Image (cartoon, helix red, strand yellow):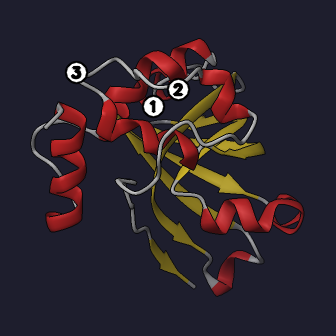
Amino acid sequence: MTAGAAVVQDYRQLGLSLRAHPLAFLRGALQELRVDCCSDVRALRDGARAETAGLVLVRQRPGSAKGVVFVTLEDETGTVNCVVWPDLLKRERTCILSASLLCVRGTVQKEGEVVHLIVREVEDFSGLLDRVPHCESEQTSDTGSADASREGQDPGKGRDRLRIRSRDFH
């Protein structure tokens, strides 16, 4: 069993893994796509542009938020809290509400220790998760090119797909 397959098995049985984070196996492919890790985004200055990707942990759409959706993304370095305005949600609803691995581009908003990424573009990177079971070690994604995922092609076989369940609140 590859290291990636062991992590997938952990997620299937427990919903998490103590071995490694799934995105650690995809970091090389994400770097090829010029996607920053979450800790790098949190370290940016207020107003900086950023692009990051992470597993969708939580989607929240409180009634008091006037249609704003808050999405928490996680990678092997931590989390980023994202703010999705109603107009973007209207245009990209399917992607925002169904992606397991979401790539977001936007502007960093910092106020003291609180950091948000105000999202202006989204892309579903869930297809990249099909590579994890085939990875022998972290930092590598041995199957297919990074561009294949950006173009929506499925580089893996899919039957060993890593399934991530977000917690969605309305």
Earlier in the chain: of badge 3 and badge 1, it is 1
In this picture, is 43 found above or below 158? above
N-term mark: 3 or 2: 2
Foreground: 51 or 26?
26
Picture coordinates of residue 46, whole percent (x, y): 64, 26
Label 1: few (<14), some (14–19) or many (≥20) C-alpha neighbours in 10 Å: many
Give the SS element for disc 1.
helix
Which is more foreground, mark 3 or mark 2?
Answer: 3
Q: Quadrant of residue 34?
A: top right
Q: Residue at x 53, y 23 (%)?
A: 30
Quadrant housing the N terminus: top left
Q: Which residue is mark 2?
A: 41
Q: Secondary structure at mark 3?
A: loop
User: Given the image, on which type of amino acid does mark 2 rest?
Assistant: Val
Q: Are marks 1 and 2 in contact (CB under 8 Å)?
A: yes
**How far apart in space, not on screen, are marks 3 and 1 (Cα)?**
21 Å
Q: Quadrant of the C terminus?
A: bottom right
Depth check: give the residue in front, 113 or 144.
144
Q: Residue 38 has which mark?
A: 1
* Residue at figure coordinates x 51%, y 57% from the top left: 100
In percent of width and height, residue 148 lies at 67, 29
Q: Nearer the viewer, mark 3 or mark 1?
A: 3
* Residue 104 as seen in the image, left or right of residue 120: left
Task: Relative to 168, say whether 72 is above or below.
Answer: above
**Dot 3: few (<14), some (14–19), or many (≥20) neighbours within 10 Å?**
some
Look at label 3 and name its amino acid.
Answer: Ser
**Residue neighbourhood size for the residue with mark 2, other residues' Cα within 10 Å, grouped as few (<14), some (14–19), many (≥20):** many
The residue carrying mark 3 is 137
Tell which of 63 and 2 is nearer to you: 2
Could you tell me if residue 77 is visible in this image?
no
